[in-house]
Image (cartoon, rainbow, N blue to C red):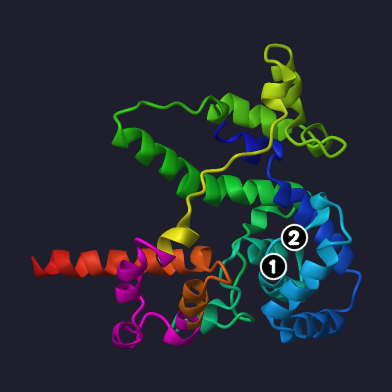
């Protein structure tokens, strides 16, 4: 239910980021930077071949698809200097924004999205609060509202009632995530009224097959928006990293759709604005 993950610690990335930071923060920053460089120096295809061999020795639960892609995406996170930077990196599709957006500040000058007023909270609580401030209203609630209104469906978000929100934030974190179980109080409440098999199921998001669409029915549309000459003329993005991601997407050996989609949405919006002004 909308708001439950942000209020009661439902996203696995909270515990994952906190555990990863606890581990890597013990390693000096220069060694972490060197490790990140070494991991990225091996091509994704080579990591995939290694993963294919390792998979024969590992149980199915520990096998990783597209190992090379995951390593190349995760390696730069080792350079993070704080929990906040690590979480920003975990959520960002483009690690080096200054290398993508023309005129953007360098990584060293970029400021974290974290609100300084959250500094008194624990690491997991800071991530939850940040999602409440940005991710929930700017992403999840927007999608729910647009999808519902498209079919004239009125929706409600009872967990975001002010009294529920205030109550949730008064609960200590170990009552929200208990012994590895997320959203613990919500689960305990639902167990009284709903059969456990309906509650203890894998999380199901709102994902769509962008990977296949961009190589199929949306390919021509995407190519027109990501054409190198067009990117250069408009001057918003550096064409080089975008064209590399697009080429990898078309080859089909690397899913770059989540990185390309924000660029495509900006390009599509900019095109509609130009058409609107012309009219």
Q: Which mark is residue 252?
A: none
Helix, strand or loop for the magenta stretch, by majority: helix
Tell me which corner region of the image, top left, top right, bottom left or bottom right, holds residue 107: bottom right
Which percent across, then down, holds residue 273? 22, 66
Which residue is at a point 72% across and 68% down the rendered structure image? 67
Q: If you read the primary sequence from the N terminus, does the residue marked by circle 2 or circle 1 appear first?
A: 2
Q: In which quadrant is the C terminus drawn? A: bottom left
Residue 42 lies within the magenta run? no
Label 2 – label 1 distance at C-alpha: 9 Å
Marker count (numbered): 2
Residue toward you, 206 or 121? 206
Residue toward you, 189 or 51? 51
Which residue is at a point 65% across and 67% down the rendered structure image? 89
**Residue at disc 1, secondary structure:** helix
Q: In which quadrant is the N terminus drawn? A: top right
Q: Name the residue under label 1.
A: 70
Residue toward you, 124 or 261? 261
Which residue is at a point 35% across and 41% down the rendered structure image? 146
Left or right relative to 7: residue 57:
right
Of circles 2 and 1, which is in front?
2
Left or right relative to 161: residue 50:
right
Label 2 CA crowd tier, 10 Å (few <14, some 14–19, many 20+) = some
Looking at the rendering, the stretch of residues picked out in magenta corresponds to 215-243
Q: Name the residue under label 2.
A: 64
**Residue at disc 2, secondary structure:** loop
Left or right relative to 2: residue 101:
left
Left or right relative to 145: residue 158:
right
Which percent across, then down, holds residue 254? 58, 71
């Amino acid at each position: 239910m909308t708001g439950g993950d942000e209020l009661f610690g439902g996203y696995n990335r909270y515990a994952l980021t906190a555990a990863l930071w606890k581990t890597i923060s013990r390693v000096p920053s220069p060694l972490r930077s060197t490790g990140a460089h070494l991991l990225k120096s091996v091509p994704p295809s080579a990591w995939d071949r290694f993963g294919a061999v390792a998979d024969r020795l590992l149980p199915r639960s520990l096998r990783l698809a597209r190992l090379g892609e995951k390593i190349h995406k995760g390696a730069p996170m080792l350079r993070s200097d704080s929990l906040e930077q690590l979480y920003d990196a975990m959520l960002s599709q483009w690690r080096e924004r200054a290398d993508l957006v023309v005129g953007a500040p360098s990584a060293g000058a970029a400021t974290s999205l974290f609100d300084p007023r959250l500094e008194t909270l624990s690491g997991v609580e800071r991530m939850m609060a940040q999602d409440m401030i940005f991710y929930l209203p700017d992403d999840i609630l927007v999608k729910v509202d647009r999808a519902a209104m498209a079919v004239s469906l009125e929706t409600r978000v009872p967990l975001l009632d002010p009294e529920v929100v205030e109550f949730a934030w008064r609960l200590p974190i170990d009552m929200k995530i208990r012994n590895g179980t997320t959203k613990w109080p919500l689960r305990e409440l639902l167990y009284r009224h709903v059969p456990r098999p309906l509650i203890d199921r894998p999380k199901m998001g709102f994902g769509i097959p962008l990977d296949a669409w961009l190589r199929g029915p949306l390919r021509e549309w995407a190519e027109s928006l990501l054409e190198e000459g067009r990117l250069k003329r408009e001057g918003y993005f550096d064409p080089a990293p975008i064209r590399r991601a697009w080429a990898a997407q078309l080859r089909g050996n690397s899913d770059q759709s989540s990185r390309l989609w924000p660029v495509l949405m900006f390009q599509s919006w900019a095109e509609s604005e130009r058409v609107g002004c012309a009219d």
